[in-house]
Amino acid sequence: MKFHCSRLVVTVAVLMAVLTMPVAARAAVKYYVSLGDSLAAGFQPTGSFAQGYADQLFTALRAKTSGLQHVKLGCFGETTVTMITGGVCSYRHGSQLNEAVAFLQRHQGSVALITIDIGANDVNCSITMPLDMRCITDASAAVETNLPSILTALRAAAGPGVPIVGMNYYDPFLAFWLQGEGGRAAATDSRQAFLKFNDTLDTIYKAAGSPVADVEGAFSTTDFATKVVSPDFGTVPLNVARICQWTWMCTPAPLGPDIHANTEGYGVIAGAFLKVLPF
């Protein structure tokens, strides 16, 4: 094995530069840690992961927070169960939660913000028509068990002063409204299911002392009464128009229909987070 003295000199020089750096400068680096499912990952059916709400939120925060870095851990398909146990995405520490806890413990005092969205994949059973309310109830029970444990672990690892901000969800199945009388009934049922599920999330986050980004409100999820004119679908309720405008649900194949937000919709979600951040 050859010994490269020049590399050693460079390595030592870099190390000495870091060690002799003023403490204030070394402490200037701050981290934003984003956790969750495919929305946190920023998935779009185009294959892009670059313009999710966490990415856009980071861009907004970096403009006013010098030295901020983004640690993006969201996982496509993650549930509250797999966030704890692993099995969907690959992490050095086995699961998304373990990965986050390890990072937070190593960087206590340097984490500025944690955001999390999780639970929507637990209730995938709600897609069927008519809605399977027992399936939704069972899935909500899993969230009620797992999400408090996740938040407790994050708080213990991050320390008491780090904001942990959650979110509720928009209802992509409002797009069923466009499918005639049966679709309108399904959209109405879907809204009721999402309102119940979001109430569960709100209660859990607030019990943990976590602010909640009101994505449900930002997408006008409850507003069937206000009618607007869509250039593609004519006169439709505002909540339906929002889903068609801000997600891929009303997009024809091959990109749609898809439940995920588009770039504009992710921006709306980022805006909902900005409204409740404590800084």
Image (cartoon, rainbow, N blue to C red):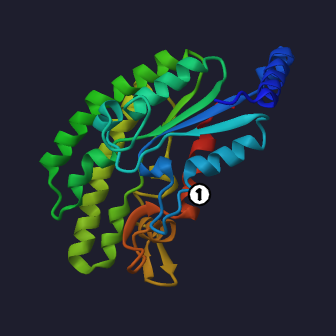
* Image coordinates for residue 262, horizontal then vertical, percent: 52, 64
Picture quarter with the N terminus: top right
Badge 1 crowding class, 10 Å Cα cut-off, few under 14, some 14 to 19, many 20 or more, is many
* Image coordinates for residue 171, horizontal then vertical, percent: 37, 57
Q: Which quadrant of the view contains residue 149?
A: top left
| Placement of 240 over or under 82, stated as above or below | below
* Image coordinates for residue 158, horizontal then vertical, percent: 54, 20
* The one of 82 and 230 positioned closer to us in this rendering: 82
Q: Residue at x 63, y 39 (%)?
A: 70
Q: Secondary structure at mark 1?
A: loop
Q: Is residue 171 left or right of residue 230?
A: left
Q: Residue at x 24, y 39 (%)?
A: 140
- Number of numbered markers: 1
> At label 1, which amino acid type do we have?
Gln
* The one of 31 and 185 positioned closer to us in this rendering: 31
| Res. 203 in view | yes
Q: Residue at x 39, y 70 (%)?
A: 249
Which residue extends farthest front?
A: 1
Q: Which quadrant of the view contains residue 78?
A: top left
* The one of 50 and 214 positioned closer to us in this rendering: 50
| Placement of 188 over or under 87, stated as above or below | below
Picture quarter with the C terminus: top right
Residue hosting label 1: 51
Q: Residue at x 31, y 48 (%)?
A: 121
Q: Is residue 220 left or right of residue 4?
A: left
* Image coordinates for residue 212, horizontal then vertical, percent: 49, 37
| Res. 224 in view | no
